[in-house]
Amino acid sequence: MKTYSNRPIETTDYLTVHDSDGNDYKIKWSDVETFTSNIGATGTRSTLTASNPLFNIWATSTATTGSLRTAQFNTYYTGTTGTENIEAVTSIVTTAVSMGQWANAFYGKIDMGTAGKVAGQVGAVCAEIAMPSTSPGGGRYTCFEAEIDAAGTGFGIGTSFLNGNAWGTNVAAFRTSGYIFEFTGLGTATADKIFDTCVAPAASHALRILIDSVPYYVLLQSNVDAA
């Protein structure tokens, strides 16, 4: 058994991670203020193989109270110029070839097994904004931002901001009792509120959606109080 001195970790030290394929990956230790670690590099990329991620965490817990997190990232921004773009976590998949049945830059799943349940709310992905206590004075604020960079052609094959797919052996029960959307906190329908009353006799606009490859139109009214 090897023994090591009790000296502090230096910025020139490396932690070497050895995978089952015989590859070694070095994580460089630095001081807390400038700590960085890399697996591969732009010009020297690590090779991925099926079902063999470069970084894997297996965790378990029997805790019955508190908040459990397998990983947590905390970013504190103190800049003042207002020109920096902030992304706490970035995941990018780049390809110029045909892929399989699905491709995701981020995938979140909660497996409820045979008897899993929750006392309140289950969400595979949660997006939340804590707004400032005073008016920010500008900008747009949304819990979910979806963008399509329409640089190419071929949108006729099926392009949308949101795709929903219900499946499984008991999908019929969802079709009977499920909802497309669920909102709380909107209050009762009141004129000129986010949940508005409508006296307009007909729609003035429509949004096209796709259900089982069939286009439908959600009717809209630009003036809900139109006579």
Image: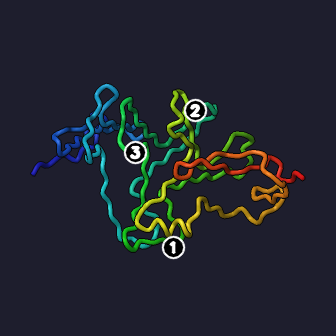
Where is 110 relative to 38, above or below?
A: below
Badge 1 or badge 3: first in the primary sequence:
3
The picture places residue 227, in percent across and down from the top left corner, at 90, 53
Which picture quadrant has residue 137? top right
Q: For the residues labelled 1 and 2, say whether their Cβ atoms are less than 8 Å apart.
A: no
Question: How many neighbours does mark 3 have within 10 angstroms: few (below 14), some (14-19), or many (20 or more)?
Answer: few
Residue at figure coordinates x 37%, y 68% from the top left: 113
In the picture of the structure, the residue carrying the numbered disc 3 is 102
* Relative side of 197 to 92, left or right: right
- Badge 2 amino acid: Glu
Q: Is residue 162 left or right of residue 189?
A: left
Give the residue type that dot 1 points to.
Ala
Distance between mark 1 and mark 3 Cα atoms: 32 Å
Say the numbered circle drawn on residue 84. Answer: 2
- Dot 2 falls on a residue whose secondary structure is loop
Q: Position of residue 187 (x, y in %)?
A: 74, 65
